[in-house]
Structures are given as structure tokens and as C-alpha cells.
Image: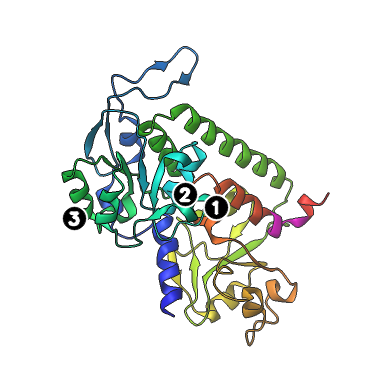
Amino acid sequence: MKKILSFLLLIVLTAGLLIGCASGGTDTESQDQSTNENTDQTEESGETADSTFPLTVTDALDNELTIDEKPERIVSVIPSNTEIAFALGLGDKIVGVSDHDNYPEEVKEIEKIGGMELNIEVIISLKPDLVLAHASSAQSSQEGLQQLRDSGINVFVVNNAQDIEGTYTSIKQIGKVTGTEEKASEVVGGMEEDFALLREKTAAISEDERKSVFFEVAPAPDLYTAGKNTFFDALLEIVNADNAAGKLDGWVPIDPEAILEMNPDVIITTYGGYVENPVKQVTSRDGWGDMNAVANEQVYDVNSDIVSRPGPRLAEGAKEIAKVVYPELFEE
């Protein structure tokens, strides 16, 4: 049970939806206005050149910092930051990652700096010139992050992304402080194209064919689901499907009887990485045999990381959801 609750907490933290964090952050508009007079922008072509250093920026908690040189040694304290950094071509500069990092494969060989609690001594010993923190955990790690600042280490708190647009902001922020703005724009553009292709593909689904989907993000006996204002909900909107729990808000516990009343067409579990045969867990429950999803064998497991981490793989996650909800659209 402890493992399950810890995993659920990690999902919520990674998705940037912890209660109370939003009060410490700035909105997307103010973050986008964080610029440096030394940053060269080619306005006529619409292209943005990579940052020049020294660079002065304001992070998600309104902390202003000046980065003298392009970072060469970076510590990432949360998996989503790490995935973004690797997508920006910064893998060889990452010297420390969290205990929860598992993607890409290279992170297994990188020094671990703690999980929910940061090991400040280890971080300092790695001699980073930039620590990529995150607004979803910055408040609880405030004392440790200040220790890093007092040690002369630049700490940049990445925004608390709560939707797709917020994810784009996170990518652009990390691109800015690492001198990889052009690559960040390229990554965001690729995601936008992938999402647009999925919208176009699933637009063929008529209103009568549109399916309701229930996400089970933690197994019995303590069932949890994802309502509105979650990445799961946003990805369902992209693939032209309904969230069966759409009247609920955020990550919430739910009673099995309530799920039966919803009678979803599809059930997607996201805990196959640590629970054996999650599909059987669902289909073998007493009284669930007549539910549409179970009766029609429409119960699937999808990798939690690609549908909950605010990073480049969200587009991949949306496609995986579309494939199990509307498989006929992806038949060769």
C-alpha cells in the first residue's frame, strides 16, 4: 500500500498538480515576459536565436538570477525536467538526476540526488552550475534550494505545468536558461504538429461514435482517477474522446460503485509498471462483467510516464491513448 500511495504521489507531483503550489508560481504570461536584454531575437524572420550569456531571468517563483555562462554541469530534480533536457540535446551535461528518473535509458548511469527529499550534500559535490528545480516541489524543498543558492549554485525553478500550453512553457524556459532556445522551439513545434495530426485523424469520429474513457491511476483497494484539469483529460480532448470522470476535478479517489454508474466504454490503467496484470485486476472484479468496457474487452494499460509527465513524450502518450480508444483508425 505504501508503494502504491508513493507512486500516486509521484504521478501528481510529476504532472505539476500538487495542491498549494500554484500560489507560489507566476502565470504563463509573466513567465513568457522574462527576457534578457542580451538575448538576440531575429524578429523579421520570426525565429529566436539561442540565449547569449550573461543571462538574467526570473523563474516560476519570481526569483531573479543571473547566469554568467552557458551551463555545462546541470542537475535535474524531477523526471520531467530531465526528459526535456535530454530532448534539447543536453544529455551530456546532466550530472545529477532524481531517484525517480527512468527515461531515457542513460539516466540509470547518472548520479542520483534524492527523491521527494533532495540530498543537498550530493548536489553540491557534483559542482553544478545550474540546478533545474520545479514549482511542484520547490516550496517543500525551499530550505535545501536556498542552501544551494548560498553555495553559489544557480537554481532555476521551472513552471508548474498544468496543461499542454504549460508544458510548452516549461520546455521554452529550460531552453532559455541552457542556451538551447532554438532547439526548444523545434521540440514544441514537433509536439504541436503531432497533436494536430491526431486531431485531424480522430476528427473522423462522429458524435455517436465518440467513446467515454475512465482512467484508473491507482488500483484497488484505493482507486484513484483523473478528472478535469489533468493531462489525462487534456489528451482525451485531443483524441476526440470523453473523460468518464470529467465532472470530477483533479486527481481524486473514487468508489467502485461510482465507476459502475459511469459505465465507460474504455478503461485505461496506468500502473502496469508496478502491478502485475492490471487488466485482469479490472476485468475480474465482482459485478463489473456487464460494464461496457469489460464486456467488450476494452480494458488496457498505458505507460503512466508518457501521459502524465509534462514533457516531449505527451504527444506519444496521446497517440497511445488514441490507438486503444479508436484502434480502427490505426489499422494498416
Residue furthest toward the bottom?
Answer: 286
Residues in magenta, as a range:
323-327
Q: Is residue 152 left or right of residue 47?
A: left
Q: Secondary structure at mark 3?
A: helix
The residue nearer to you, when weighing 44 against 142, is 142
Residue located beneath label 3 in the image: 143
Answer with the quarter of the image where residue 296 lies: bottom right
- Mark yes or no: residue 250 visible: no
Mark 3: amino acid: Glu
Question: Residue sitting at 38 percent across and 31 percent down?
Answer: 176
Q: Position of residue 268 (x, y in %)?
A: 61, 66
Give the mark nearer the N terminus: 2 vs 3.
Answer: 3
Is 296 situated above or below 208? below
Question: Residue sitting at 47 percent across and 49 percent down?
Answer: 310
Mark 1: amino acid: Glu
Mark 2: amino acid: Pro
Q: Position of residue 263 (x, y in %)?
A: 63, 73
Q: Main secondary structure of the magenta part?
A: helix
Is 152 situated above or below 256? above
Answer with the quarter of the image where residue 7 lies: bottom left
User: How far apart, in angstroms, are the residues tagged by discs 1 and 3?
Assistant: 31 Å
Residue furthest toward the left?
Answer: 150
Give the mark nearer the N terminus: 2 vs 1.
Answer: 1
Residue located beneath label 1 in the image: 105
The residue nearer to you, when weighing 54 against 232, is 54
Marks 2 and 1: which is nearer the front? 1
